[in-house]
């Protein structure tokens, strides 16, 4: 059996290792579809994708695939679809595992059905017209039509993602079911519980130079300590000046062509950019009841990456392999027979790709090259692409 996980591992912690071990306890190999250098919150990852791949393999993953960048830093619905698309295309995944605050798969399926029902959609439009965010409006619409029990699933981040996984599975006719594992960690930003801490809490501690080893599997902690000493740092702070330069050089028309921008939001952003002197100040200036901090931060990331609305027109045209264990090597051999998309493990594998696939590969490479500017040492273009697939010891 093969269990799939869609994740960021930013950074990997004891909660992720617990999930991997639960999958192994079911007798399944672990395939992790992991975001690369930029994340769903619109932020830069604290460690590069190869460091995080090594950590994942040491924590129990057998095969690590890259969640395509245009999905990895998108809203929950698109993030979930991208991960499900890759795992479905691999052709050998039997079950999707995900952490969940409720741990109630039946309620999650009910909520996924609810958010697609016509009466909920009608109520959603009413709440949106009152200036509510999409997430708040959808939750309220489900509460109105289905009641508190179903709407409650839409109040916590991992359950919301689980709902989107179910929706994506229906859309893609994915053959594997969802299996939820009750979260043992604190919610984002909260105080740790025992030796479990959220990824957002750990990112804060890393930036402040504090010890996080109590919350990280020992083998992964060693990797992260080494990375912090040699190549990492506060990547977000390094990125800020570059981002401010990019934002100040953009016209209203260029802002209007960013992915996921609408309703004249480019004007609000333009005014904020030219009134403020930091990214946080820009976000605070532009934020409103309708536009969340997370959505605005993603928009700024799209600007940094020079993306336009064109980037979302194509589905991922290949599967990027980041690393594998001995068991993962066997899975890769199987996937060569079952996969619906080409498998890319090294640059040479891109030679035979279609023009569309090459364009997507180049888009990812440009994102990696920008990430290479954010560490303690500026890396030449192409350095990260030449790192190659990680093979577990």
Image (tube, rainbow, N blue to C red):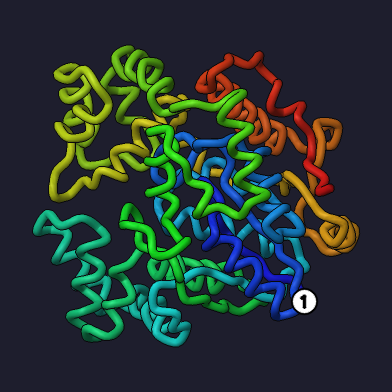
Residue 159 vs residue 110, the one in the foreground: 159
Above or below, 125 against 231 in this view is below
Corner quadrant of residue 296: top left
Q: Position of residue 159 (x, y in %)?
A: 40, 70
Q: Looking at the image, which residue sits at the far left? A: 130
Q: Does any portion of residue 316 appear in the rendered image?
A: no
Residue at the (68%, 36%) spot, across then down: 356
Above or below, 344 against 123 in this view is above
Residue at the (82%, 45%) spot, across then down: 391
Residue 163 vs residue 354, the one in the foreground: 163
Q: Is residue 270 left or right of residue 86?
A: left
Q: In which quadrant of the rendered image does the N terminus lie?
A: bottom right
SS class of the residue under badge 1? loop
Residue 123 vs residue 300, the one in the foreground: 300
Q: Which residue is mark 1?
A: 1
Residue at the (50%, 53%) spot, across then down: 214
Q: Does any portion of residue 52 appear in the rendered image?
A: yes
Above or below, 113 against 362 in this view is below
Above or below, 158 against 325 in this view is below
Q: Position of residue 5 (x, y in %)?
A: 61, 63
Corner quadrant of residue 156: bottom left
Q: Position of residue 205 (x, y in %)?
A: 40, 41
């Amino acid at each position: 059996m093969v269990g799939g996980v869609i994740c960021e591992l930013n950074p990997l912690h004891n909660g992720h290792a617990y999930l991997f071990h639960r999958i192994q306890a079911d007798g399944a190999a672990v395939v992790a579809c992991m975001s690369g250098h930029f994340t769903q919150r619109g932020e830069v990852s604290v460690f590069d994708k190869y460091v995080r791949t090594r950590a994942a393999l040491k924590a129990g993953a057998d095969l690590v695939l890259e969640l395509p960048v245009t999905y990895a830093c998108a809203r929950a619905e698109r993030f979930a679809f991208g991960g499900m698309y890759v795992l479905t295309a691999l052709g050998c995944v039997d079950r999707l595992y995900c952490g969940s605050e409720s741990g109630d798969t039946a309620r999650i399926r009910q909520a996924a059905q609810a958010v697609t029902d016509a009466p909920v959609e009608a109520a959603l439009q009413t709440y949106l017209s009152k200036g509510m965010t999409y997430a708040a409006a959808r939750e309220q619409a489900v509460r109105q039509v289905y009641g508190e029990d179903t709407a409650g699933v839409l109040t916590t981040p991992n359950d919301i993602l689980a709902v989107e996984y179910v929706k994506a599975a229906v859309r893609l006719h994915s053959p594997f079911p969802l299996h939820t594992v009750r979260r043992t960690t604190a919610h984002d930003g909260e105080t740790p519980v025992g030796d479990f801490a959220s990824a957002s809490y750990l990112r804060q501690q890393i930036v402040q130079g504090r010890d996080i080893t109590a919350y990280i599997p020992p083998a992964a902690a060693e990797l992260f300590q080494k990375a912090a000493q040699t190549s990492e740092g506060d990547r977000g702070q390094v990125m800020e000046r570059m981002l401010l330069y990019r934002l100040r050089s953009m016209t209203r028309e260029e802002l209007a062509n960013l992915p996921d921008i609408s309703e004249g939001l480019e004007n609000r952003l333009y005014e904020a950019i030219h009134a403020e002197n930091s990214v946080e100040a820009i976000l605070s200036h532009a934020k409103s009841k309708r536009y969340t901090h997370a959505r605005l931060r993603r928009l700024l990331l799209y600007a940094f990456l020079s993306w336009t609305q064109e980037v979302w027109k194509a589905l991922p045209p290949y599967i990027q392999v980041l690393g594998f264990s001995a068991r993962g090597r066997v899975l890769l051999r199987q996937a060569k027979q079952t996969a619906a998309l080409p498998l890319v493990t090294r640059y040479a594998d891109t030679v035979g790709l279609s023009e569309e696939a090459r364009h997507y590969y180049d888009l990812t490479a440009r994102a990696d090259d920008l990430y290479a500017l954010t560490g303690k040492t500026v890396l030449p273009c192409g350095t990260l692409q030449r790192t190659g697939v990680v093979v577990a010891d």
